[in-house]
Amino acid sequence: MILDRSLRLLFFAALAITLFMALNPSPPAVIIDVWGDKAQHMLAFGSMALLARLGFPRAPNWLILERLSFIGALIEVFQAIPSLHRDCDWKDWAADTIAAGLALLLVAPLRLWLAGRRAPRSTVGSTGSNGGSEDFG
């Protein structure tokens, strides 16, 4: 589906921006700097979880969470490289993982709603395997 493909492209764009901001020795200032480092991590990983959930509809939540958590951990490992002049902090990884998990929980109702909109409409007068009694309990 075209929407899935667009959301996948947005996911990979968000991933590239996140990696650039996390691994650049002197990242540019952004508006959310006033809320601190954890807010940046949570916004980035929450956004990526949302885009991954909607862009990869067949992927289970646990897999998306595991992959995003792994990316967050790798970022922290790379930030330990002295030449990057960045701080490695396990709390940043925790913020990444928590934000991704919360985003996946919050997007579940939206995903169900979208699935309902994509489902084919039943025709009037058609019956299911039980002769149509599923409508009446």
Image (spheres, helix red, strand yellow):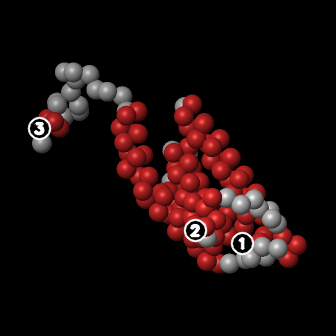
| Amino acid at pointer 1 | Glu
Q: Nearer the viewer, residue 60 or 53?
A: 53
Q: Earlier in the sequence, mark 1 or mark 2?
A: 2
Q: Secondary structure at mark 1?
A: helix
In the rendered structure, the answer to whether residue 113 lies left or right of residue 104 reads left
* CB contact under 8 Å: marks 1 and 3: no
Residue depicted at x 56% and y 48%? 51
| Amino acid at pointer 2 | Trp
Q: Earlier in the sequence, mark 2 or mark 3?
A: 2
Quadrant in which residue 21 is drawn: bottom right
How far apart are labels 1 and 3 at the CA level? 56 Å
Closer to viewer: mark 2 or mark 3: 2
The quarter of the rendered structure image containing the N terminus is: top right
10 Å crowding of disc 2: few (<14), some (14-19), many (20+)? few
Residue occupying the far right of the picture: 83
Q: Nearer the viewer, residue 130 or 44?
A: 44
How far apart are labels 1 and 2 at the CA level? 20 Å
| Residue 85, placed above or below residue 44 | below
Q: Nearer the viewer, residue 117 or 92?
A: 92
Q: Which residue position is annotated with label 2?
A: 35
Residue depicted at x 26% and y 22%? 123
Residue occupying the far left of the picture: 136
Q: Which residue position is annotated with label 3?
A: 136
Q: Position of residue 114 (x, y in %)?
A: 41, 39
Q: Which residue position is annotated with label 1?
A: 76
Q: Can the viewer see residue 59?
A: no
Q: Earlier in the sequence, mark 1 or mark 3?
A: 1
Closer to viewer: mark 1 or mark 3: 1
10 Å crowding of disc 3: few (<14), some (14-19), many (20+)? few
Q: Position of residue 59 (x, y in %)?
A: 54, 50
Quadrant in which residue 41 is drawn: bottom right
In the rendered structure, the answer to whether residue 11 lies left or right of residue 54 reads right
